[in-house]
Image: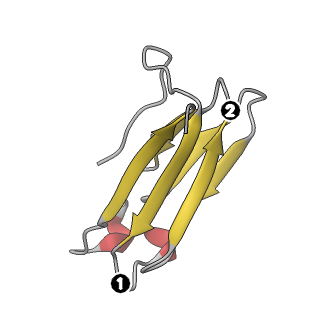
Amino acid sequence: DYTLLHDSVHEEPGIDFLLDFTPSWPQDAGGDIVYLDSKGKTHFISPGFNQLALIVKSPGTLRYFKYVNHGAGEKERIFLLGTVGESF
């Protein structure tokens, strides 16, 4: 699965947290989370098993999931993704 980048969904500023539960995910299999900042710069987030990533989102930052390709085989990527709003 994947998501497309479009402007009909507006991400609120805040902090995203991502905890990966997928052991031994092949790095070439895709499935990364990509952030696009307001200046057009991309940031690829691909944490490893049992790692926590914290991403500070400024206004205008968009998020999408890069497609999972054939390199994943039968594996599934499992992670927890959430957002703490700007008023934390």
Crowding near the residue tagged with mark 1, few <14, some 14–19, many ≥20 C-alpha atoms within 10 Å = few
Can the viewer see residue 31?
Answer: yes
Q: How is the image coloured?
A: secondary structure
Q: Secondary structure at mark 2?
A: loop
Q: In the orientation shown, which residue stands out farthest toward the left?
A: 74
Given residues 4 and 45, the one toward you in this image is 45
Q: Please, which residue is most extreme toward the front here?
A: 88
The residue at 75%/39% (across/down) is 41
> Image point 42% across, 59% down: which residue?
31
User: CB atoms at circles 2 and 1 under 8 Å apart?
Assistant: no
69 with respect to 85 (left or right): left
Q: Name the residue beneath numbered marker 1.
A: 23
Figure quadrant of residue 36: top right
Which residue was labeled with disc 2? Answer: 58
Q: x%, y% of residue 8? A: 43, 14
Callout 2: 10 Å neighbours few (<14), some, many (20+)? some
Q: In the drawing, does residue 77 fall left or right of residue 45?
A: left
* Residue placed most toward the observer, 70 or 31: 31
Instruction: Indicate the quadrant where residue 58 lies.
Output: top right
Looking at the picture, does residue 43 appear above or below residue 19? above
Q: Amino acid at mark 1?
A: Pro
The residue under the point 39% across, 53% down is: 81
Asked whether residue 46 is in view, the answer is no
Residue 39 position within the rendered picture, expressed as x and y whole percent measured from the top left = 78, 28
Q: Nearer the viewer, residue 26 or 22?
A: 22
* Quarter of the figure with the C terminus: top right
Q: Going 35% across and 84% down the picture, which residue do you hit?
A: 23
